[in-house]
């Protein structure tokens, strides 16, 4: 979110300009938000679930787990900057009957702790909930912190359920749902002041279910995460140009709700656009395309996703526009794809 620089006069001191490259918020200016829905949701759930414990690798403040730590200090474990130890400890606690919520950044879980998650958690099908901030392109730090390949990595891991929530409402619904689920879960976390979007659509999170948020005759968007937020806004703008868009939100990436996707794809002849905050390799787009082809469907299919590349560092609005996931670029690309026909 850009700001105008303060004019400098002879009498005014020079103000140091700052950059938004380090800001992970994806809320638009004036958009309604809720603070730390994961942290507050976990505290609420823990009131009736004494088995719930929280662990982090030196990132409690940056994954909103500090709220849980303050409420339940005797059920919180600070593991330091040691993600492999974090996952191994979570596995051990799960074996002893606890319900561990382990938080870190998505890049650290997917890349640094992969083998420990695979061997200690997934192979044993333990109920560890891995909740990770900075998914996809939600930080301007650059490739060291942008988890553009995390879904691809965890989709290939047996027993792993994957959730990519859209907003605060999705996160609040997902926390108790994944706690009830008996196996391991990877949840992509939006942290801090998280936008509220789905309150307009009579929506409730259900594990493993995709939900149609709006109907339309020309385009069907199938989306997850913050791209659901973006395509909903794009659909409103495209309406003004006479383009009618449906939006099917699929917060559960694995297992995919194939039945609902097929039903929506069969309803009418529409351009189908899969939109995700992830690399074009190995994410929701490939999962949807494979499901359609395996079931004999071949719709007109296009993909809004991040490129198969290491992305630049910088301010998020600039990066989102550069890589095609801003509302403006989604509208532009949708019109172009429709004109191809």
Image (spheres, rainbow, N blue to C red):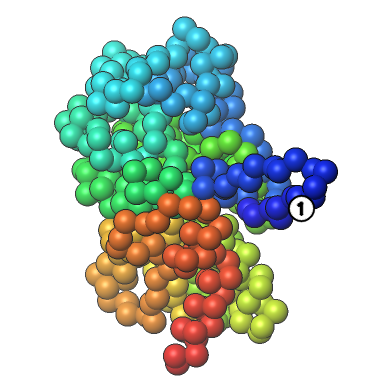
Which residue occupies 32% across, 36% down?
108
In the image, residue 113 above or below residue 137? above
Q: Is disc 1 placed on a helix, strand or loop?
A: loop
Q: Residue at x 70, y 42 (%)?
A: 15
Question: Could you tell me residue 49's position as x and y percent?
Answer: 49, 18
Side of 35 where 264 appears, left or right: left
Number of callouts: 1
Residue at position x 63%, y 64% in the image: 233
Is residue 169 visible in the rendered image? The answer is no
The reply, left or right, for residue 160 in relation to residue 101 is left
Classify mark 1: residues with Cα within 10 Å, few (<14), some (14-19) or many (20+): few
| Residue holding disc 1 | 7
**85 sits left or right of 179 in the view:** left
Q: Residue furthest front?
A: 10
Q: Specify the quadrant that holds the C terminus.
A: bottom left
Residue placed most toward the observer, 5 or 321: 5
């Amino acid at each position: 979110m850009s700001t105008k620089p303060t004019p400098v006069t002879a009498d005014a001191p020079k103000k140091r300009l700052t950059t938004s490259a380090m800001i992970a918020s994806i809320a638009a200016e004036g958009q309604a938000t809720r603070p730390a829905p994961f942290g507050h949701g976990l505290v609420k759930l823990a009131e009736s679930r004494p088995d719930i414990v929280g662990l982090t690798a030196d990132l409690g403040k940056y994954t909103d787990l500090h709220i849980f730590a303050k409420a339940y200090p005797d059920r919180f474990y600070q593991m330091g900057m040691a993600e492999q130890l974090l996952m191994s400890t979570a596995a051990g606690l799960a074996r002893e009957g606890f319900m561990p919520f382990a938080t870190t950044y998505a890049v650290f879980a997917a890349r640094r702790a992969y083998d420990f998650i695979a061997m200690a958690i997934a192979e044993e099908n333990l109920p560890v909930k891995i909740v990770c901030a900075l998914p996809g392109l939600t930080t301007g730090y650059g490739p060291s912190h942008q988890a553009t390949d995390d879904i691809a990595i965890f989709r290939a891991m047996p027993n792993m359920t994957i959730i990519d929530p859209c907003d605060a409402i999705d996160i609040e619904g997902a926390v108790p749902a994944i706690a009830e689920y008996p196996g391991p879960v990877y949840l992509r976390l939006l942290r801090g002041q998280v936008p509220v979007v789905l309150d307009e659509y009579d929506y409730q999170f259900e594990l493993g279910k995709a939900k149609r948020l709006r109907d339309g005759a020309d385009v069907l968007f199938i989306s997850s995460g913050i791209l659901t937020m973006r395509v909903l806004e794009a659909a409103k703008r495209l309406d003004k140009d006479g383009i009618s868009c449906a939006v099917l939100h699929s917060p559960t990436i694995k297992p995919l709700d194939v039945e609902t996707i097929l039903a929506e794809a069969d309803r009418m002849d529409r351009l189908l656009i899969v939109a995700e905050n992830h690399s074009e390799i190995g994410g929701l787009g490939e999962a949807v395309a494979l499901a359609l082809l395996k079931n004999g469907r071949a719709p007109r299919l296009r993909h809004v996703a991040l490129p198969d590349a290491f992305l630049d560092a910088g301010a998020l609005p600039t990066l989102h526009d550069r890589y095609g996931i801003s509302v403006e670029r989604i509208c532009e690309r949708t019109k172009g794809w429709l004109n191809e026909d």
